[in-house]
Structures are given as structure tokens and as C-alpha cells.
Amino acid sequence: QKEVEQNSGPLSVPEGAIASLNCTYSDRGSQSFFWYRQYSGKSPELIMSIYSNGDKEDGRFTAQLNKASQYVSLLIRDSQPSDSATYLCAVYILRNQGGKLIFGQGTELSVKP
Amino acid sequence: DGGITQSPKYLFRKEGQNVTLSCEQNLNHDAMYWYRQDPGQGLRLIYYSQIVNDFQKGDIAEGYSVSREKKESFPLTVTSAQKNPTAFYLCASGGQGGQETQYFGPGTRLLVL
């Protein structure tokens, strides 16, 4: 089992719809969770961080965390073609020699006009 | 203007050659990181440094070396021992705790001639 898993996609949604991106993680003790957006050929840019169970909203983006189910998701409302990118889920996982940020393989999102 | 810079944007390596990728940050972050990204893959940690004059191996350190002589700088050398160096190299910085958000530079794309 991978430490952080995402569906690779591509996930295709029409413009104006809600895009739902999912991520599961294996380490029950994880405390910090991040979503990054990466356009083709560019570096990742932070969208959201979330540390507590529940929802966290920032503009059109909502991150949802459920530690009991070891599940974190990102909802994008009113999706725009400019949201087309790969979305990376990252989880801070504690290990014997310290913690590390572990990335999923990313979900490719395509928003069709 | 705060941020992380990486140079060069593209780098070509000849057989048996060592090459060095530059990473500089003016965000006053204690921790710096090097990741490698292969097509369609997530990010894999090469090396990281929590404080000046100290660094630790990540998950794929073989064939790479780093130094951290200044807080602002964390150069990565890709040695001739790295047999498959073609990838997108990303430098990041963040708080010392590691659980804090990591911010990425624009990346260096390394190609083998």
C-alpha cells in the first residue's frame, strides 16, 4: 500500500461544475495535509493546508479532512478551464528519523469549456 | 521580493559529468529540500536540511550530494554515479518543523546528452 494515494485521472468536468479530488493516506498519526496545484511544465504551488478534521474553505476551494477514515479531499466549485492542472496531495508522515512530506502521484483535472 | 530561485532552468549533462543545480531562498526559512519528479510521477525526496551545516538523505539520495553552508543556499550536485538523471528537479523551503508548508522554486529540468 502506498503511503499517499490518489486517482491519477484524468478527471474531466464541465466548466461551472464541482470537481472533487480525493486522497487517502496510510499513517494514522499524520497531522498536516496539503494540496498543491501543478500546471504542465511548472512547479507545484500551494492551494490549501489543513490540520483539523472538517472543512476549510478558501474562495472556490474547500479542503475536507477525515482522520478516522484517513481521507482528505479537495473540492473546486465553479470549475474554470484555468483550473486544468495536476493536483498533488501531500501528507506529513512521522518516521523514526524524523518526519517527511510524502506526495501522492497527482490527479490530472481537465475542465472543459 | 521574497521567493525561491533555481538556476539554470535547463541543464544538459554529458556522460560522466557532475553538474550542480542552484537553489536560493530569501524567505528566512530554516529548512530546505530537494525533490525529483519523473513524468507522471509524484515528488520523491532526495535530500533535506533542517539547519545550516546539517543535512539528511531522503528516499533516493544515491548519486546526489548537497551542502548547506548558508541558510539561503542549498545546492544539489548530480554526480556521474546517478545513472538516470533525466528529471525535473524541484527545490523547496519551509519551517524547521517540517510539518509547516513547503514552498517550491520554479525547478530545473536536467537532460542527458
Image (tube, helix red, strand yellow):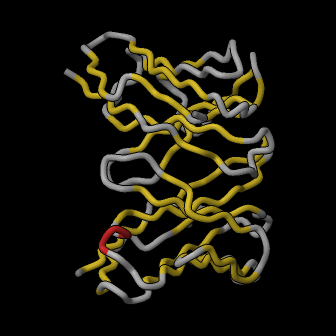
On-image quarter of the C terminus of chain A: bottom left
- Taking the image as shown, residue A55 lies to the left or right of residue A109, namely right
Residue A97 appears in the picture as rendered: no
Residue A43 appears in the picture as rendered: yes
On-image quarter of the N terminus of chain A: bottom right
> Residue placed at 57% from the left, 33% from the top?
B1
> Residue placed at 30% from the left, 27% from the top?
B10
Q: Foreground: B80 or B93? A: B93
Vertical position of residue B5 compared to residue A83: above or below = above
Q: Position of residue B53 (x, y in %)?
A: 75, 16
Vertical position of residue A12 compared to residue B27: above or below = below
Q: Foreground: B60 or A52? A: A52
- Taking the image as shown, residue B22 lies to the left or right of residue B8, namely right
Vertical position of residue A74 compared to residue B36: above or below = below
Number of disc labels: 0
Q: Residue furthest left?
A: B113
- Taking the image as shown, residue B84 lies to the left or right of residue B106, namely left
The quadrant where residue A10 appears = bottom left
Vertical position of residue A67 compared to residue A87: above or below = below
Q: Foreground: A64 or A106? A: A64
Q: Position of residue A83 (x, y in %)?
A: 38, 70
Q: Residue furthest bottom?
A: A17
> Residue placed at 36% from the left, 64% from the top?
A85
Q: Foreground: B72 or A80? A: A80
Q: Position of residue A98 (x, y in %)?
A: 78, 43
Q: Residue furthest front?
A: B1
Q: Position of residue A67 (x, y in %)?
A: 75, 77
